[in-house]
Image (cartoon, helix red, strand yellow):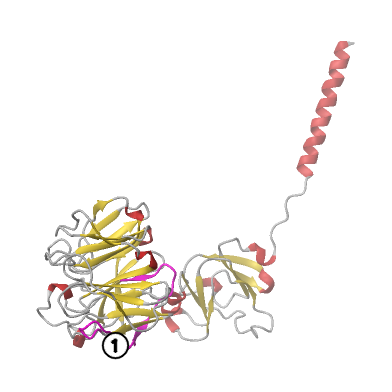
């Protein structure tokens, strides 16, 4: 009797298990994405047919030619953080029609009246970049060009010897692109009339502060300071050709500083110094030791948390001493004349408005007259204002286009 019951129990259990297995196998799967939802989050996608049908291609980089996708796209989706420019001609045969697509633009179907079939099966190349500037201009650097007439006079005093990384007496810039690549802009124009940026290296978005102001280790070459996200300050010795040697650690704990500015010789000892404003609003001077590091800091003063930008322009007043510019929250730019002893005289208000979203850049003498000048941005343009040697600035003059990417920095 017990044996029969056991067999029945086993048979029942097997039948139940088989039924459950059948239910599991026959359960409907989740429906596959259709239409524009086929394009994954964070991606840029091309579709073979209108209404996001047919084959789909996920694009991750620029396509100078389209291969089998040449003139074979009828809809697209931009779910990515990239700017994209699509063209009716291959990259080697531009111009032609072009269309710039903003990041996270979403879906576009080329069959409707919005496009009048202009883009239906007409795309022959595309460009992708993290900024609109790089997408349109095909390069991540500004067209910073200087002529021989901009060469600085021989024998400038030490206070004016900054903003020249390759020692050719011509002002140059460093530009960090939005993607973290650092470029050296010599200002030298090539045979084709254009300029070329030279890549210093990648990964510079890990730096939260970047500053340069002449020679800090007494070898006659301009150097660079950079603070990383961990709060470590690094010294990059210049090689005299627009690049840098192996970095050395200055010290940690620099995340307590809201802003860091290499400032020239503030103390009059012939060595270049550093200024830093901390989170409490105290401004500190770090006297340079001529080896790339610093002696014990000294307090310049408090109340500097009203300022959102420090700029070290060299000698604006013509007295041979390094000065300081600071922009406050009311868009006013103030000149603090250096006294040559590590502090500053009474400040002077500079004319005009200086909005917080505009960059202010000091690169020394820009036009070859031996006087320090100032650069600043207005939206997508870079302007120069020439110093008059007595603490004033001339009117703003257009210089070149500016890349408005969020992480772009020029200095």
The question of residue 12 being in magenta is answered with: no
The question of residue 396 being in magenta is answered with: yes
The N terminus - image quarter: top right
Residue at the extreme top of the image, as rendered: 1
125 to 266, vertically: above or below: below
The C terminus - image quarter: bottom left
Q: Is residue 43 visible?
A: yes
Judging depth in this view, the residue of 335 and 1 nearest the camera is 335
Judging depth in this view, the residue of 164 and 395 nearest the camera is 395
Residue marked by disc 1: 394
Judging depth in this view, the residue of 330 and 401 nearest the camera is 330
* Residue 392 x/y as whole percent: 26, 84
Q: Which residue is at a point 80% across and 33% down the rendered structure image?
A: 18
Q: Which residue is at a point 55% across and 72% down the rendered structure image?
A: 69
Left or right: 222 in relation to 194: left
Mark 1: few, some, or many residues within 10 Å (few <14, many ≥20)? few
Label 1 sits on a secondary structure element that is loop
Left or right: 317 in relation to 405: left
150 to 331, vertically: above or below: below
Residue at the extreme front of the image, as rendered: 346
Which stretch is magenta? 387-411
Q: Quadrant of residue 301?
A: bottom left
**Magenta stretch prevailing secondary structure:** loop
* Residue 39 x/y as whole percent: 61, 63
Judging depth in this view, the residue of 286 and 194 nearest the camera is 286
* Residue 42 x/y as whole percent: 56, 62
Q: Is residue 176 visible?
A: no
Residue at the extreme left of the image, as rendered: 155
* Residue 13 x/y as whole percent: 82, 26
Q: Which residue is at a point 49% across and 82% down the rendered structure image?
A: 89
Give the number of callouts: 1
Left or right: 258 in relation to 343: right
């Amino acid at each position: 009797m017990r044996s029969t019951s056991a067999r029945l129990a086993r048979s029942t259990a097997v039948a139940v298990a088989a039924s459950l297995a059948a239910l599991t196998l026959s359960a409907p799967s989740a429906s596959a994405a259709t239409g524009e939802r086929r394009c994954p989050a964070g991606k840029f996608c091309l579709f073979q047919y209108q209404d996001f049908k047919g084959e789909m291609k996920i694009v991750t980089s620029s396509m100078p030619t389209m291969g089998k996708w040449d003139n074979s796209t009828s809809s697209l989706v931009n779910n990515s953080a990239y700017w994209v420019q699509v063209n009716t001609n291959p990259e080697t045969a531009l111009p032609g029609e072009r269309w710039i697509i903003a990041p996270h633009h979403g879906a576009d179907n080329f069959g409707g009246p919005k496009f009048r079939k202009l883009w239906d099966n007409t795309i022959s190349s595309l460009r992708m970049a993290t900024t609109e500037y790089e997408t349109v201009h095909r390069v991540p650097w500004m067209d910073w060009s200087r002529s021989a007439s901009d060469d600085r006079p021989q024998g400038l005093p030490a206070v004016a010897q900054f903003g020249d990384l390759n020692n050719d007496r011509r002002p140059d810039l460093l530009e960090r692109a939005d993607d973290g690549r650092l470029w050296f802009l010599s200002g030298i124009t090539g045979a084709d009339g254009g300029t070329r940026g030279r890549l210093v290296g990648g990964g510079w978005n890990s730096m939260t502060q970047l500053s340069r102001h002449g020679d800090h280790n007494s070898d006659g070459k301009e150097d660079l300071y950079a603070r990383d996200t961990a709060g470590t300050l690094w010294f990059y010795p210049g090689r005299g050709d627009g690049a840098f040697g192996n970095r050395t650690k200055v010290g940690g704990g620099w995340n307590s500083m809201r802003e860091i500015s290499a400032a020239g010789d503030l103390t009059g000892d012939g060595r270049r110094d550093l200024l830093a404003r901390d989170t409490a609003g105290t401004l500190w001077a770090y006297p340079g030791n001529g080896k790339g590091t610093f002696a014990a800091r000294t307090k310049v003063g408090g109340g500097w948390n009203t300022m959102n930008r420090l700029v070290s322009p060299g000698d604006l007043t013509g007295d041979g001493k390094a000065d300081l510019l600071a922009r406050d929250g009311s868009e006013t730019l103030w000149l603090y004349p250096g006294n040559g002893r590590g502090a500053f005289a009474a400040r002077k208000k500079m004319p005009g408005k200086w909005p917080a979203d505009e960059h202010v850049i000091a690169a020394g003498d820009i036009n070859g007259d031996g006087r320090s000048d100032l650069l600043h941005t207005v939206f997508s343009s870079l302007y120069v204002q020439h110093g008059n040697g007595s603490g004033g600035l001339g009117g703003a003059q257009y210089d070149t286009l500016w890349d408005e990417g969020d992480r772009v920095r020029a200095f």
